[in-house]
Image (cartoon, grey):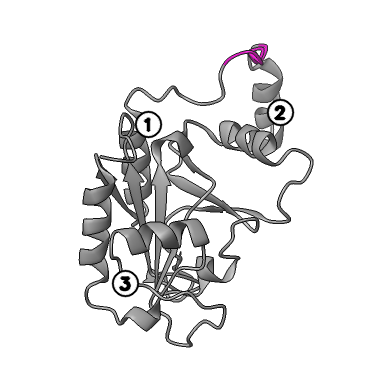
Amino acid sequence: MSSAREEILNKLKNAVHPKPEKPDFDAPVYFPIEQALEDAFKENLEKVNGSVHLFNSETDLYQKLKTLLAEFPQELIICNESELGKQLKQHKVPFTSTKNLPENLQVGITFCEFLIAHTGSVMVSSAQEGGRQLLVYPEIHVVIAKYTQLVDYLEAAYVGMKKKYGKNLPSQITLITGPSRTADIEKTLVMGAHGPREFHVFLLRSKVTESE
């Protein structure tokens, strides 16, 4: 009578071991995005508690932004990017520009480098005029973006960065995918643990001119 060990070894010896399927290295890594890029970006970012606001005109975009900011004092709304500051002033959006960020900073408003539809991520970098602080310090981070910054996959964003900066790539390139969150403590999801607790992207759709 064979032992249990011998029985197991015999089963392994007599088992059929089909050849593994040869990998197709030419096949695409990701599934294709079958919807409009802005819709895919919105769907994927909102899956991780971010908010995406789509607009057909700059007027509507900045009017919605004013509504979002209405409850906050102007001195606690910070934007340190000069071109963005001009647009905020043009549309009479309240904000303050200062390098000495207040301890109780509420809202930071910035541009971005790219938006990645596949993951709902926002690419930012240290080359942006506002610096790194406004990406992590505020309770609420608002990103203003255009459709031309929207790409399908991460690779396209990196190609865009190389095209934009050449050999002088920023010292830091970061992906933001939703507000800061953690579930390390008792498996309870906590928002804003290591950065903004709210993350908003205001996106101007395609086929929109600056004068609209």
The residue drawn where x is 42% and y is 44% is 120
Return the disc, 2 or 1, that comes first in the chain's sequence: 2
Give the secondary structure at mark 2.
helix
Give the secondary structure at mark 3.
loop
Residue 43 spot, x, y in % from top left: 31, 41
Residue mark closest to the camera, 3 vs 2:
3
Q: Residue 117 versus residue 203: which sits nearer the camera? A: 203
For the N terminus, which image quadrant?
top right
Query: Which residue is under mark 1?
Result: 37
In the image, which disc is placed on residue 64?
A: none
Looking at the magenta stretch, what is its main secondary structure?
Answer: loop
- Find residue 133 and report its image quarter: bottom right
Region in magenta: 19-27
Residue 183 spot, x, y in % from top left: 44, 68
Residue 20 is one of the magenta-drawn residues: yes
Query: How crowded is the residue under tag 1: few (<14 C-alpha within 10 Å), some, or many (20+)?
Result: some
Residue 26 in sight = yes
Q: Is residue 103 above or below residue 163?
A: below
Query: Which residue is under mark 3?
Result: 94
Distance from label 3 to label 2 (Cα)?
A: 75 Å
Query: How crowded is the residue under tag 3: few (<14 C-alpha within 10 Å), some, or many (20+)?
Result: many
Amino acid marked by disc 1: Leu
Q: Is residue 164 above or below residue 47?
A: above
